[in-house]
Image: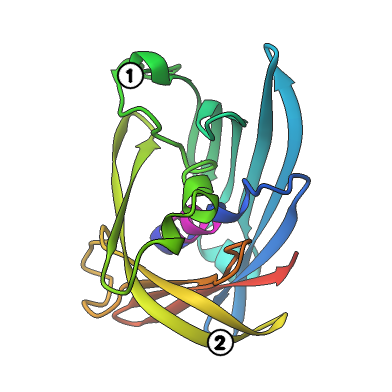
Amino acid sequence: MRVAFIILIFFISSTICAQNTNEHLKFDIKFGMIKGGEVFFQTSDTLVSNIYATNARLHGYTTGFAHMLYKVNDSFESIIDKSNNYPIKSFKNVSEQNYRFNNEVHYYHHRDSAWSKETGWHHIEPGVSDVSALFYNLRFSGILDTINRGDTISLPFWDTGEWYYVDMIHDGIEIIKTNFGKRECIVLKPLNIEGKFFSKIDPMVVWLTNDQQRLPVLMKLNFNIGSVKCVLVNS
């Protein structure tokens, strides 16, 4: 339950830093036909130390029966420099059953460094992004315009006290039904997902609209005992 929810939040966070700020989106997380959670997004313009930036907020939580099994109430926030799409600082507030984690990170990309309130100074790859900012470049840098089926994308990602590359493979184009009608979508399959509970065949699949918005209208996690879907229901 916890793994599915957190990974889904990670990938749908690709929507929260759109070029059109003041974006408000809602996703439903479904375990079969049962709704197990909701995720909300909001972006707005802000000014930080005379830097024009985007304030991206992400809030996800379990509902209903899923909430009874494993309570999750997580929020993430980033301040992203509009000039280069890099995060200036980020905030993480996690509440999962009895587990609590709060952290603040400041990024100094010009010095290849980041400072974490919890773990101190770290060497980073310039352009590394947290969960609230990672997919900005994926959506709007044009990288998806220049790759073909079978090509792999690698993006540097900051997670708690370390960074690593998130790899995804372009698996072609599909027409799928969404809450907004039939949409042509790019299919991405993350390559970094491991674990004994995941299916060995396509553990995760993400469908991004093949247009300027690149909205992740559908995501699917495949486990040995079933699947979890995340569906965009309002934009």
Q: Please, what is the three-letter code of the amino acid marked with disc 2?
A: Ile
Residue identified by numbered label 1: 112
The image position of residue 185, as x and y in percent, is 52, 77
Q: Nearer the viewer, residue 227 or 1?
A: 227
48 sits left or right of 87 in the view: right
From what the image shows, is residue 206 above or below residue 73?
below
Q: Quadrant of the N terminus?
A: bottom left
Rendered residue at 30%/29% (across/down) = 125
From what the image shows, is residue 50 above or below residue 185?
above
158 sits left or right of 164 in the view: right
Element type where label 1 sits in the image: loop
Residue 150 bears which disc, if any?
A: none
Is 97 colored magenta in this rendering? no
Is 7 colored magenta in this rendering? yes
- Between the C-alphas of marks 2 and 1, the distance is 41 Å
The image position of residue 180, as x and y in percent, is 72, 80
Rendered residue at 53%/55% (across/down) = 139
Q: Quadrant of the C terminus?
A: bottom right
Element type where label 2 sits in the image: strand
Q: Please, what is the three-letter code of the amino acid marked with disc 1?
A: Asp
Observer able to see residue 97:
no
232 sits left or right of 128 in the view: right
Q: Residues within 10 Å of mark 1 (few under 14, many from 20)?
A: some
From what the image shows, is residue 223 above or below residue 81?
below
Residue 82: quarter of image: top right
Residue 192: quarter of image: bottom left
From what the image shows, is residue 104 above or below residue 142?
above
Query: Which of marks 1 and 2 precedes in the sequence?
Result: 1
Which residues are the magenta region? 6-12
Q: Residues within 10 Å of mark 2 (few under 14, many from 20)?
A: some
Rendered residue at 63%/49% (across/down) = 16
Residue 176 bears which disc, if any?
A: 2
